[in-house]
Amino acid sequence: MHQTNSMLNISQLTKDDIIIVHQLAHRIWPDAFKDILKPEQISYMLDWMYNMNTLTEQVQTGHLYYMITLDGAPKGFIGLEPNYPDAGTLRIHKLYVDPNDQGKGLGKALLEKAVEIANELDVASINLNVNRFNNAVDFYKSQGFEIVKEEDINIGKGYYMEDYVMVKAL
């Protein structure tokens, strides 16, 4: 039986190609959150977090964005911020993979990239927030993250992010 090897590639995005994150988020979010959030909240959060001005500003102020491609096609991304919320930590703000390509190791590859960057920066831990009702909680646990607390964050218009804060010690 002939086995084909898919090519995974992770590359850093600059402000000139950050539109890829905008496009991927609009493709992935409606599916990722359809059972958790109302469509209006998904639209509101996409407008807030993934508008081009916000993304461009983040890249210019030190956020690191990486895209993962499978056989040359963009399939997911990770957004990182060094030393947030305090020194010695790396924050994963965003990690999303196209629902059609989950289970292929793309999320794991993006997390491994985050660990590599954390090691380069010599930080002690990686932290993230994840919706408490998101299946990704189990994925992060399987990758060595632990829940350290719960947070309900008021994001305006009567919407809340009901999150776990998760940490992976390095």
Image (cartoon, grey):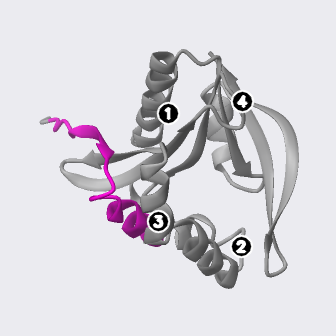
Comparing 62 with 31, the one in front is 62
- Type of residue at label 3? Ala
Q: Which numbered mark, 4 or 2, is in the foreground of this view?
A: 4
Question: Image quadrant of residue 83?
Answer: top right
- Type of residue at label 2? Leu
- Type of residue at label 1? Leu
Q: Which residues are magenta?
A: 3-28
Q: Earlier in the sequence, mark 2 or mark 3?
A: 3
Q: Label 3, on which residue?
A: 25
- Quadrant for the C terminus in the image: top right
In whole angstroms, how far apart are the C-alphas of marks 3 and 1? 18 Å
Comparing 5 with 93, the one in front is 93
Question: Image quadrant of residue 42?
Answer: bottom right
Q: Residue at x 68, y 29 (%)?
A: 145
In whole angstroms, how far apart are the C-alphas of marks 2 and 3? 15 Å
Place of residue 78 in the rendered image (x, y in percent of width and height, measured from the top left)? 47, 46
> Residue 99 in magenta?
no
Q: Residue at x 33, y 56 (%)?
A: 15
Whether residue 99 is visible here, answered yes or no, is: no
Residue 111, which numbered label?
Answer: 1
Q: Earlier in the sequence, mark 4 or mark 1?
A: 1
Q: Is residue 114 left or right of residue 7?
A: right
In whole angstroms, how far apart are the C-alphas of marks 4 and 3? 24 Å
**Seen from this angle, which residue lies furthest front?**
61
Around disc 1, counting alpha carbons within 10 Å, would you say few (fewer than 14), some (14 to 19), or many (20 or more)? some
- Helix, strand or loop at label 4? It is strand
Around disc 4, counting alpha carbons within 10 Å, would you say few (fewer than 14), some (14 to 19), or many (20 or more)? many
Question: Image quadrant of residue 105?
Answer: top left
Whether residue 66 is visible here, answered yes or no, is: yes
Q: Label 2, on which residue?
A: 37
Around disc 3, counting alpha carbons within 10 Å, would you say few (fewer than 14), some (14 to 19), or many (20 or more)? many
